[in-house]
Amino acid sequence: MSDIQRPASGDVGGYDAIVLAGGAARRLGGADKPGVRVGGRPLLDRVLAACADAWTTVVVADPRPTARPVTWTREDPPGGGPLAALAAGLPLTGADRVVVLSADLPFLGEPTVKGLLAELEAGPADGALLTDPGGRDQPLVAAYRAPRLRETLAHLGAEHGGLTGLPLRLLTAELNLTRVLDPVASFDCDTWDDIATARARIREHGLVLDEWISAVKDELGIDLDVDTGVLLDLARDAAHGVARPAAPLTTFLVGYAAALAGGGPEAVAEASRKATALALRWAEEDAADADAAGAADAKTTPEPRPDAG
């Protein structure tokens, strides 16, 4: 078993994605689980963001608004279980590798998807899947070789007279799988307690800014990776060197200038550099004026007269 906490992101070739989002969510009282919001975003949109570079993304569920376009399909009959849903989505894909995901993974990110694909390519296995800290397999957070997946589903369907109602363990038992430990990305939301845990976690100090930036980009339809550290440094310098309200106003103007310059991370970085330099010059002038004023005060302050004897 591999132990990969956060696989490095990288281009490991093309793939398709199938997201299963049509379950009954009985442990949530029948709630619309893919639409439940964590960090201001529906769970389904969070998962779709993790596989945004898939050639084709198929969602097996009834259609709904999503943050990016996808292909919709449904198992027949609806609610036939994960193997039936997987079999419904697979014919709509064409890549040799397919990432299979459930729609209830609040902490799944692109690096984990890339890591699973890299693990799949590293050896002769039929698939690479996540396991949780308890050793429980997560077949719906996995990358598979599509031909082998089709072959196995066809075999199981023929053996059992169909796939409706069959458990996922029948699929994994037939495949040679590599297992990847990822305690964070493997966390799924089956209950309201799980939802509450996920909502609390993303507000932790080390995660909240990245979560917020991701949510804002999704909300605004922005596909742009920028160095948030540069923007935070700029906001700090503007707040300290000019005035506190200068921080949000300056970062807004930087974004506007970057857009006028054609957009992209380079344009943001260049506009940030110029604004930061200005804020530092402003602070230097203020400090110099304060020093000069202090020196002038010292010269004009009369020396205390000695007491008369």
Image (spheres, rainbow, N blue to C red):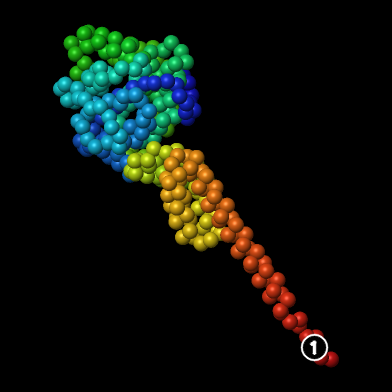
Image quarter of the C terminus: bottom right
Compared with 26, 303 (above or below) is: below
* Residue 283 shows in the view: yes
Compared with 121, 36 (above or below) is: below
Give residue 100's quadrant in the image.
Answer: top left
Residue under the point 43% across and 41% down: 262
Query: Residue 173 placed where, x, y %?
Result: 33, 13
* Residue 207 shows in the view: no
> Does 118 sit left or right of 162 as displayed?
right
255 vs 238, nearest the viewer: 255
Give residue 56's quadrant in the image.
Answer: top left
Residue under the point 22% across and 11% down: 157
Residue under the point 76% across and 83% down: 304
Residue under the point 31% across and 17% down: 94
User: Which residue is situated farthest in the front direction here?
Assistant: 261
> Does 227 sit left or right of 19 as displayed?
right
Query: Residue 50 placed where, x, y %?
Result: 38, 31
Query: Residue 187 placed where, x, y %?
Result: 37, 32
Q: Secondary structure at mark 1?
A: loop
User: Which residue is situated farthest in the bottom direction here?
Assistant: 309
Compared with 308, 23 (above or below) is: above
214 vs 20, nearest the viewer: 214
User: Which residue is situated farthest in the left direction here?
Assistant: 77
Residue on which disc 1 sits: 307
Q: Identify the amino acid type marked 1.
A: Asp
Query: Residue 145 placed where, x, y %?
Result: 36, 14
> Does 3 sit left or right of 23 as displayed?
right
58 vs 38, nearest the viewer: 58
